[in-house]
Image (cartoon, helix red, strand yellow):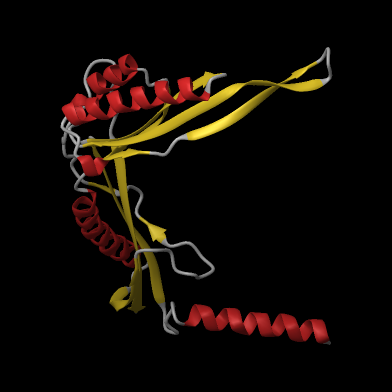
Amino acid sequence: MKICSIVLTAALLSAQSFASSLPSQPHLYVQGNAHMQVQPDRAVIRVAITEKSKSLSDAKKRVDDVMANAISIAKNHKIKLDNIHAEQLNVYRQTRYNRTTNQDEFDGFRVSRSLTLKLEQIERYPVLLQKLVDAGINEFNNTQFEVSNKSALMKSLKKVAIKDAKLAAKELASDFDVKLDGLYSVSFSPMEIPRAPYARAESMKVMSSDSGSVENAYNTGALTLKAQVYAVYTINN
């Protein structure tokens, strides 16, 4: 009896949580989609310099010299000071196990510093990378390519996704010979209801905007931006 009571309570709670998303009258649940491909126009570059030496002073000096050169190169490539982030020094004392003596022996100091650069003129990316290598940078952690006007593009995409949701609702209503009564609810994230929304066969595509590219050996490729909207429409016969 106790177990049945718990199951019944859970079912009631579940029904109440869905009630706010769905109307009690007949309705359609649809999904609108939109996407576009854009060329990135800026990059966030994460690199580092790592040196190993039994002299901590020598390793630190080498790392600091390379970092100073890298920062100077970044400035020469029109990177703003606010977009240059040089991390603090990291020092690790390393040991190596000696099988003859069965002891750990000092193997030197590993000294490193990381540098993050936000490059707003992506056409400078190939040359900047080569300059950093020439300066002594020996670790390239990752580069994240971005679109500077992403918020504006996403705003436009959401409007297209809404248009797609309207078309999906009309399409579904027509297939079932019912009439749309009105919009009950809308969300830009999936609703917590126990079924998937209806979506049109193909999402609406927005023409891509060519906002820059990387030439020669460094081709970033296009970034795909997506927007979804979820809507519930009431219907009548």
Dividing the image into 4 quarters, which one contains the C terminus?
bottom left
- Residue extending furthest toward the top: 100
**How far across and how far down the image is residue 187, in percent?**
35, 68
User: Which residue is rendered at x = 23% and y = 25% of the image?
Assistant: 73
**How far across and how far down the image is residue 213, in percent?**
20, 28
Q: How many marks?
A: 0
Report the front residue among 31 and 55. 55
**How far across and how far down the image is residue 107, in percent?**
64, 19
Q: Quadrant of residue 191?
A: bottom left
Looking at the picture, does residue 117 appear above or below residue 233?
above
Report the front residue among 133 and 213. 133
Looking at the picture, does residue 169 appear above or below residue 218?
below
Q: Quadrant of residue 77?
A: top left
The answer to whether one can see residue 147 in this image is no
User: Which residue is rendered at x = 23% and y = 19% of the image?
Assistant: 127
User: Which residue is rendered at x = 31% and y = 21% of the image?
Assistant: 132
The answer to whether one can see residue 4 in this image is yes
Q: Is residue 111 left or right of residue 187?
A: right
Q: Quadrant of residue 89?
A: top left
**How far across and how far down the image is residue 51, in percent?**
48, 21
Dividing the image into 4 quarters, which one contains the N terminus?
bottom right
Report the front residue among 55 and 23. 55
Q: Is residue 141 left or right of residue 147?
A: right
